Each structure stands twice: as C-alpha cells, then as structure tokens.
Image (cartoon, coloured by chain):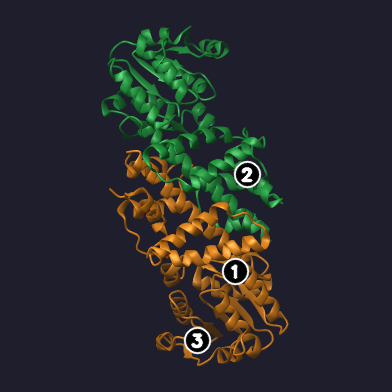
Chain colours: A green, B orange
Amino acid sequence: MEKLGFIGLGIMGKPMAINLIKAGYDLTVYDINAEAVTAVAAAGARAATSIAEVARTNPVIITMLPNSPHVKAVALGPDGIESHANAGTLLIDMSSIAPAASQEIAAALKEKKIRMLDAPVSGGEPKAVDGTLAIMVGGDEADFAKAKPLFDILGSSAVLIGPVGSGNTCKLANQVIVALNIAALSEGLMLAKKAGTDPQKVFEAIRGGLAGSTVMNAKAPMMLSGNFKPGFKIDLHIKDLANALDTGYLTGAPLLLTSTAMQILQQLHAGGDGQSDHSAIARFYEKLAGETIKD
Amino acid sequence: MEKLGFIGLGIMGKPMAINLIKAGYDLTVYDINAEAVTAVAAAGARAATSIAEVARTNPVIITMLPNSPHVKAVALGPDGIESHANAGTLLIDMSSIAPAASQEIAAALKEKKIRMLDAPVSGGEPKAVDGTLAIMVGGDEADFAKAKPLFDILGSSAVLIGPVGSGNTCKLANQVIVALNIAALSEGLMLAKKAGTDPQKVFEAIRGGLAGSTVMNAKAPMMLSGNFKPGFKIDLHIKDLANALDTGYLTGAPLLLTSTAMQILQQLHAGGDGQSDHSAIARFYEKLAGETIKD
C-alpha cells in the first residue's frame, strides 16, 4: 500500500482522508484535535502524534487547514514539514489560502528540495464526502501528474491552472464572483419585492435568460423560502474575500464591488449570521428593507 | 386580417413589426422617423402620419419606444392614444420603462376604458429579428390572454408576472443582476490576471461550478478576446439602471452594488464606451488596472 500523510482532519479533511483510506492508501494522519485523529484512525489510518512524524515517514503529504497562518506553521514551523521531511517529498496543500502564502511556502520548501502544489477545492462538505470536489491546482506538471490519482479519488475534476499560487488565485476569483452573484440576486429579488412584484415569479421569468446563473438556481429558492442553512458559511466566505482583497492590494487588482461585498459579509457576521449559508447575504438587504424576500 | 397598430420602429420595433406583418396582421405603423415608416410600409404595413391615426383605427396597439417620457407622450399626449383611441382598445407597451410610469399611464388610460399591458422584452436585436424574445408581462389575465398570440409571434416565452408595472419591474431586476454579474466576472478575471494567473484557464476551471452563469459563458470570451462589439449597449444599460435606481428610491429597495455599477457604466459612457457592449464593464477595470484581461 502506498504511504500518504494527511494533516488537518476538520469538516473537509476528515471525509477526504476517509475516502483515501477506502481507496487503499496507507494513511498517517495528524490534527491538533486528538479526537479527530482517533476517529480517522478508527477508519483505518495510522495515528501520528506530531507533524514531524507525518513528515519523516511519508513521500506525499496532503494538508487541509483553515487559512494561510496554519499552513505556514505546519509547513515551515520548527516541528514542521520543512525541518523533517525528506528531499523529494511532495506537499499537496488543499487548504484555501492566500496565493502569496502558497508562493512563499513553496519557495522556502524548494530550498530543502521539497515540492509543493497548491490545490484548493470547491464544493464543500457534501462533495468532500462524495469525492466529487472541484480541485484547482497550481504547480509543476510533473507534480500535478504525481498527484492526479489522489485528485481522482477526492474530486470529480482537477485542473492545473498555472504555477504555485494559481490554484488559490483561481479559487479567490471563484469566491469573488460567487459572493457578488449572490449579492446581485439579492438586490434584484428585493427590488422586485419592494416594487410589489412576486420575486418567485421574477425568478421563474428570468432564470432562463442572461441573468441566469448557478448561484440563482441554487440560492434563489433559499431566499424565497427564508432558509439560510449552510452550505457554505458566511464566516468562510469572509476568510476568502479577505484573501482576495489582500491579493488585490498586493497585485493592484481593482475590487470595488468585492470590497462592499466584504462589508456586507462582515455586517452579517456582526449581526450573528456568521454560521449561516452565504445566501444569507440576502438578509443584509432584508434588514435594510425591513422586509423579507420570502412572503 | 386582424388590425393592429404599431408605434416605434427603431432597432427593436422594426423587426418586431415585420414579424407581425409576416404572420398576417394588418399593421398600421407610425414613427417620428419617416424613413422607418417608409421601410416598414414597403414590407407590407399601412403608413400612418400621426399617433392619433393609429389610435383611432386599431383595437390593439403595440408601442416600442426608448423610455418612460416617450411612452407617456405617445399614450397621454394631446395627439396620443388616451385622446384618440376607442374605449376597449388594448395598449401593449413593450418598451423597457420605469414601472411607476407604466402604472401611471395605465391608470390614466383606465379613465377612458383603455386597457394596458406592460410587456418589456429581453434578448436584443437578434432575438427581435428571430421572434425569440423573452417577454415579461404586467397586467390583467384577460388582456394577457388577448395579447398571447402576438407574444407567440414576437417571442419564445411570455410570462405574466403580476399587475401592470410588474413586467418592467421584472426587467429591471433582470438588468440589475446582469450588470452586477458582468462586474463580478470582471473583478474575478482581473484579479486572476493581476495575480499572474491565466484568466482563460480560470474561466475554464470555474465555469462548471457555483460561479458559473449565463453571463460568464456569454461575456468571458468577449473579455478574454478584447471584443466589446454590441450586443447590448452600455448606454441602454445606463437607462435601465437609472430606472432601477429610481424604482429603488420610490419603493425603498436597497441597491448598494447597483449604484456602484451605475457609476461604472457612467464612467464608461464618459470615456467614449457608451456604444460598446455592456461586457465593456471589464474595460473600467482594465483602465484602473493599467492592463487588459486579454493577453
């Protein structure tokens, strides 16, 4: 059985690790949460007690962590991959982090001849469980080819976008568009409601035309029924837009509407909606309007 | 042959009138541009020399005009429909105007027992020519049923949304969402470009996911090739967002992102892009960024 390290057994990482175990990999897993390690060990993984232990014993390591600082700590910290992995190790970081952080980590690891791909995903927990994530990859073609059998287990698609950092740049572009498409839908449906027109009928009339979108099909029914159960949480979208705005600042990309969308998300967080689905962007408009899109 | 009046023979009205002639209607047409009248008369219509003449002689009249003031003048002006049409006449206004203007005109016409539908369309000139417009209708069910055979000639779908004004409200919700989805796409692709990632590959990687939209499929290729040939012009989208913002003001609908989108469109107009396709929203970002999405 092929040896594989896996660090980060949260909502996403746990089902991904389990899918790799089921596919026959000899997994060594670590998380700062010992309970998560125990649970995945019960499914057939080896339980490691440190990052260093994972790093020393595995030629390929997947990380699935919350954000840039966590990946930096795991990759470059004193107990981390840089200090303990063998030359030739491949780190596949599937966390959604800042592209600049991916590039910084990859450059540091390169000094120790450790390879890296950034490979963030979209699709959320249900697709992590089903092994149908969409995987956006940055790095070298040879490394991508090496990782491809793993991506085929974890996802329904994996696309090499460009050099390291490109996976996360792609993910951020995706998240910018999704947040703004949700806000666009909210403004359109609330305009209909306030003007005395049934938003459900407007949705049905326009979904087949140029205004139609995957966001509209997925989120309009949630807004129309007042159901904002996640799905993808407001607090996670805040993290992604923070990385997008940082990337915009570093590279000079103009993000005028995204900066307002960030304010909307942050106001929702402040109002207690951080754990709601990101379709709750509609709730920001509902609060302002003093009525709901739902009748 | 059934008699039908048609007022407004511009880019949209002319091919719509010609489709009705081809379908066998006895059309009487009028436009302030005598050349347009002559052209449509050559296709088989009767040429009228005034609105009053159209109003007196037709039980059903279609108007296809630029904006609210034009429809008000044709419907309620001294030479207009209110003063000259018979009781029981049905006005089908297919212009894209302010919902409040539709309601005001319908209320005034009702005093003279003249019925009205507001029935704006989407799809632009190509779908006007093909008779495949999407028609969004406000008014009574009986009037909608009476107009349905005409809608079936002019469009591929016609949906009764609600009372008079609802057709235009629906159209404005559509235009709000379209403008913002184009801006969202522009911000996402420019972020990718500035961060050093190929926007073409980003488009291909994300179009199948939650960020996917009809706008993305139609407009990303235009942005990626730097082709902003209309299509639907910036100046027309300015008209629609002006009506949307007015409607938001009158009804209390919050249009935070739409107001910024309006500024973007107006800046493009000021910079000479008023006759470009609305996908040229990307050009606003390109000017700020000092580079194009296209390589």
Asked whether the residues under the numbered discs 1 and 2 touch, taking CB atoms below 8 Å apart as contact, a structural biologist would say no
Q: Secondary structure at mark 2?
A: helix
The tag on residue B29 is 3
Q: Residues within 10 Å of mark 2 (few under 14, many from 20)?
A: some
Q: Secondary structure at mark 1?
A: loop
Which is nearer the eye, A79 or B277? A79
The tag on residue A16 is none
What residue sits 41% from the left and 61% below the top? Answer: B268
Q: Secondary structure at mark 3?
A: strand
Task: Examine the rendering and report whether any part of residue A197 can be seen.
Answer: no
Three-letter amino acid code at disc 1?
Ala
Three-letter amino acid code at disc 2?
Met
- Residue behind mark 1: B98
Three-letter amino acid code at disc 3?
Val
Q: Nearer the viewer, mark 1 or mark 3?
A: 1
Q: Residues within 10 Å of mark 3 (few under 14, many from 20)?
A: many
The tag on residue A222 is 2
Q: Chain of mark 1?
A: B
Spot occupied by residue A31 in the image (x, y as percentages of width and height): 50, 14
Spot occupied by residue B189 in the image (x, y as percentages of width and height): 39, 45
Q: Separation of disc 3 and disc 2 at Cα?
A: 46 Å
Tell me which corner region of the image, top left, top right, bottom left or bottom right, holds residue B35: bottom left
What residue sits 50% from the left and 69% below the top? Answer: B155
Q: Could you confirm whether marks 1 and 2 are on the same chain?
A: no
Mark 1 or mark 3, earlier in chain: 3
Q: Chain of mark 3?
A: B
